[in-house]
Image (cartoon, helix red, strand yellow):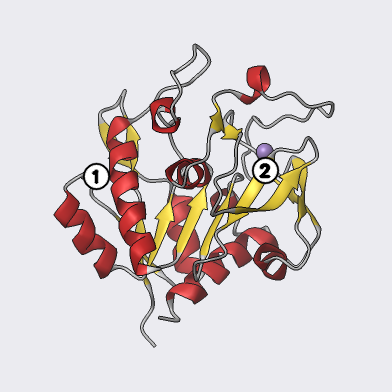
């Protein structure tokens, strides 16, 4: 069987005026049996429609904050840099990919974007807006491969079948998070403070997203590798 072709949403560094990619996203896809392709940054609808047909699976990567306008809020002072080009591209691409029911794996911003595009909202800044009696840190310092907080994985969920654990330790490098979960999604994992850390779209073949960063430790963390493996496997079953 041919290896699945995986489209990877590009990263943008505005200060350096560059498109770029973290090796982990590409290498993890390769290690799990796929061929990764970084997409061009475009909001051309017909190009996006074409790309949604060309690839077997779609990796929605981490990156800038999502424009709060997309979920009906004004950007607060605490909201970080946004990227309108990525917002536009990902909105169009996700819609097309969903129509085709092709596999989607979202990481960090990817999870947040999927939630917003399906009607959910975000905390623009966890430390100042998310209230919980349990305090845990979601913005770790390097090395980012190091797991720093636990998540509890929903029993009998797709995520639990993939990871094989109920409590799993993850890395954490995010200052935004899901406030209101979009209706088509279900929470698949929660941190000890109650923040949603993974979601699944049950109506679809494979739409899974995590708030943590498996691309940083897929080489040494079994659970991280299995996430990529499950994604690539679903991309090969079409
Ligand atoms: Mn976290």
Mark 1 highlights which residue? 41
Mark 2 highlights which residue? 196
Q: Which residue shows up at 73% across the image and 46% down it? A: 190
Question: Is residue 15 left or right of 191 when viewed as pictured?
Answer: left
From this view, report whether residue 31 is shown above or below residue 41: below
Furthest-bottom residue in this view:
1
Would you say the beta carbon of the disc 1 residue lies within 8 angstroms of ligand 1? no
**Other residues around mark 1 within 10 Å, as few (<14) / some (14–19) / many (≥20):** some
Q: Is residue 143 visible?
A: yes
**Other residues around mark 2 within 10 Å, as few (<14) / some (14–19) / many (≥20):** many
Q: Quadrant of ligand 1?
A: top right
- Residue 227 at x, y = what percent? 59, 63
Q: CA distance from mark 1 to mark 2?
A: 29 Å
Q: Is residue 10 visible?
A: no
- Residue 4 at x, y = what percent? 38, 74
Q: Disc 1, disc 2: CB below 8 Å?
A: no
Element under label 2? Answer: strand
Mark closer to the observer (1, 2): 2
Viewer-proximal residue, 30 or 139?
139
- Residue 197 at x, y = what percent? 66, 45
Element under label 1? Answer: loop
Q: Quadrant location of the N terminus?
A: bottom left
The earlier-in-sequence mark between 1 and 2 is: 1
Furthest-top residue in this view:
77
From this view, report whether residue 232 is shown above or below residue 127: below
Choose top left, top right, bottom left or bottom right for residue 85. Answer: top left
From this view, report whether residue 151 is shown above or below residue 19: below
Q: Quadrant location of the C terminus?
A: bottom left
Q: Which residue shows up at 46% across the image and 54% down it? A: 25
């Amino acid at each position: 069987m041919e290896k699945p072709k995986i489209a990877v949403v590009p990263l943008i560094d505005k200060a350096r005026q560059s498109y770029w990619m973290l090796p982990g996203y590409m290498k993890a896809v390769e290690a799990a049996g796929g061929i990764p392709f970084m997409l061009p940054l475009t909001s051309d609808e017909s190009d996006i429609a074409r790309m949604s047909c060309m690839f077997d699976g779609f990796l929605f990567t981490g990156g800038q904050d999502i424009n709060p306008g997309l979920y009906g809020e004004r950007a607060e002072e605490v909201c970080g840099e946004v990227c309108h080009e990525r917002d536009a591209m990902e909105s169009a691409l996700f819609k097309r990919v969903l129509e085709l029911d092709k596999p989607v794996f979202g990481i960090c911003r990817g999870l947040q974007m999927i939630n917003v595009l399906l009607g959910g909202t975000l905390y623009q800044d966890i430390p100042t807006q998310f209230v919980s009696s349990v305090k845990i840190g979601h913005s770790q310092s390097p090395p980012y491969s190091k797991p720093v907080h636990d998540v509890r994985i929903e029993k009998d969920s797709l995520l639990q079948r993939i990871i094989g654990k109920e409590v799993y330790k993850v890395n954490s490098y995010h200052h935004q998070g899901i406030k209101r979960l979009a209706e088509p999604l279900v929470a698949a994992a929660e941190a000890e403070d109650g923040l949603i850390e993974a979601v699944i779209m049950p109506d679809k073949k494979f739409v899974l997203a995590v708030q943590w960063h498996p691309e940083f430790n897929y080489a040494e963390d079994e659970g991280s590798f299995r996430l990529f493996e499950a994604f690539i496997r679903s991309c090969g079953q079409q």
